Image (cartoon, coloured by chain):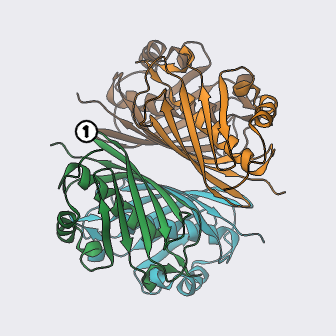
Chain colours: A green, B cyan, C orange, D brown
Amino acid sequence: MAAAKMSVAELERFLRVEFPQTFGGDDVTIESADGETCLLRQRYSERMLRPGGTISGPTLMGLADCAMYVVLLSAIGPVGLAVTTNLNINFLRKGAPGQDVLAAAKLLKLGKRLAVGEVNLLSGTAPDPIAHVTATYSIPNA
Amino acid sequence: MAAAKMSVAELERFLRVEFPQTFGGDDVTIESADGETCLLRQRYSERMLRPGGTISGPTLMGLADCAMYVVLLSAIGPVGLAVTTNLNINFLRKGAPGQDVLAAAKLLKLGKRLAVGEVNLLSGTAPDPIAHVTATYSIPNA
Amino acid sequence: MAAAKMSVAELERFLRVEFPQTFGGDDVTIESADGETCLLRQRYSERMLRPGGTISGPTLMGLADCAMYVVLLSAIGPVGLAVTTNLNINFLRKGAPGQDVLAAAKLLKLGKRLAVGEVNLLSGTAPDPIAHVTATYSIPNA
Amino acid sequence: MAAAKMSVAELERFLRVEFPQTFGGDDVTIESADGETCLLRQRYSERMLRPGGTISGPTLMGLADCAMYVVLLSAIGPVGLAVTTNLNINFLRKGAPGQDVLAAAKLLKLGKRLAVGEVNLLSGTAPDPIAHVTATYSIPNA
């Protein structure tokens, strides 16, 4: 198992500066990150919803993208310029209104130039994912 | 060429009710929609940006998802319950800060149960897309 | 846990008729299938390779597609007309020449009209996947 | 418009050596390639079919992957080690039995490290694509 290059506290400090929109408030918190996986929680808010009371697609895509970035930083340390090159999302189920959304990310590959991971998006404590994401990040040259 | 089932004015009225978050203000406008293609414009705002001054992923994914919905409504008429089942996005280039973002959508297939389309996301008047999306919508039973 | 609607022997008999190209010989075997997951093995052959000695993309995509079909049949019983609507593959690592390729599939969602699953493709006994697939099948009306 | 770095004759000579499985016979021919787009034709054969008489997924995925490689070579010249990192395919319609399959590829981005393109797969002279592919290639360091 890879050792994490950044602690959760270091990740939160770094991201509050890098991603003030997402991590500036206390909506999104990092529950864990160990260099191979991470778990993010986004606190329920009505702004997440689209008509019909389901969690909006951009909310899920944004949180999944963040989770991929967090697990990547946790694996390689503070690199500000990694960018998403591809993201594929399958929407699977409605989330329950009133519930937090969790993003459980796992690195599938950590190469020199590309990192690939998958993210299961969960609604509260329900076991079945409401969406599944794979994403690729391009890592700048050291 | 298929005839549009809804005019641009009808689409905007429908979407202001269905998607108040996106279409409630005047940030996103429908430039055209003809039953096979559509063009959406999202007015530049600093809220679109992520650090480094690029347009954020969730902004692009959200706008592309809207454009797919608009072209689908324009092809089949007002159906509130169509939902995205899959979205794949390739991020290609940085958008220019200060420029509007445009989404040019085209239906690739309109079946009874599934519609598939592609969306080129453009920055201002630059010809090369900043991102490319394919998306699938599930159409509820008539 | 869902009960399998078809045993491995029933699946192999059905697929030898339905997919003679893939299951007609003894190249591909079903190691297990339980209504939620399945494991397929494709025996190593030089025909799998592309130049450089890596397993070819079409081999991996074809095996993953089969694995999704097998786990779906195992969940819903013999339905000949289910068709793939979307397949996304991330190529992660070179497989080892001379090794069998395994496909470990898992259903992420089994709806009335759509089934979504993921497949990890493995080279011999190495633990890290050489490719990762998500795929969607459209299920015909009962 | 970018100038092609290799002529069609040079591409076919290169690919017969690099991809003898695909280009060794005369099943697949390059109709055109100009540094930004290319058109490939795969001659109809019964081996392409899956049960029900549709063109098999691996046939379409394999041909699309080849088309992406051809348009990339045509843009950057003979580079043997470019590899596919991601491929997303949407299956749209049945192809007509007895018809050749054509793959019309277009580069969406040609970067130093990554190239992204899209491919429309066509059945004979029918205008609507039977499948649509986006794919990413990783380009080795010069």
* Residue A4 location (% of width, % of height): 23, 52
Q: Residue at x 76, y 32 (%)?
A: C12
Quarter of the figure with the C terminus of chain B? bottom right
- In this figure, what is the number of numbered marks? 1
- Residue assigned mark 1: A112
With respect to residue C66, does A51 lie above or below? below
Q: Which type of secondary structure does the marked residue at label 1 adopt?
A: loop
Type of amino acid at the residue the image marks with label 1: Lys
Position of C96 relative to B130 (above/below): above
Asked whether the viewer can see residue C125, the reply is: yes
Answer left or right for A17 relative to D77: left
Q: Chain of mark 1?
A: A
Residue B22 percent coordinates (x, y): 46, 80
Q: Residue at x 69, y 66 (%)?
A: B139
Left of B107 or right of it: where is A119? Answer: left
B137 and C72: which is toward the camera = C72
Please give left or right for residue D96 compared with residue A5 in the image.
right
Quarter containing the N terminus of chain B: bottom right
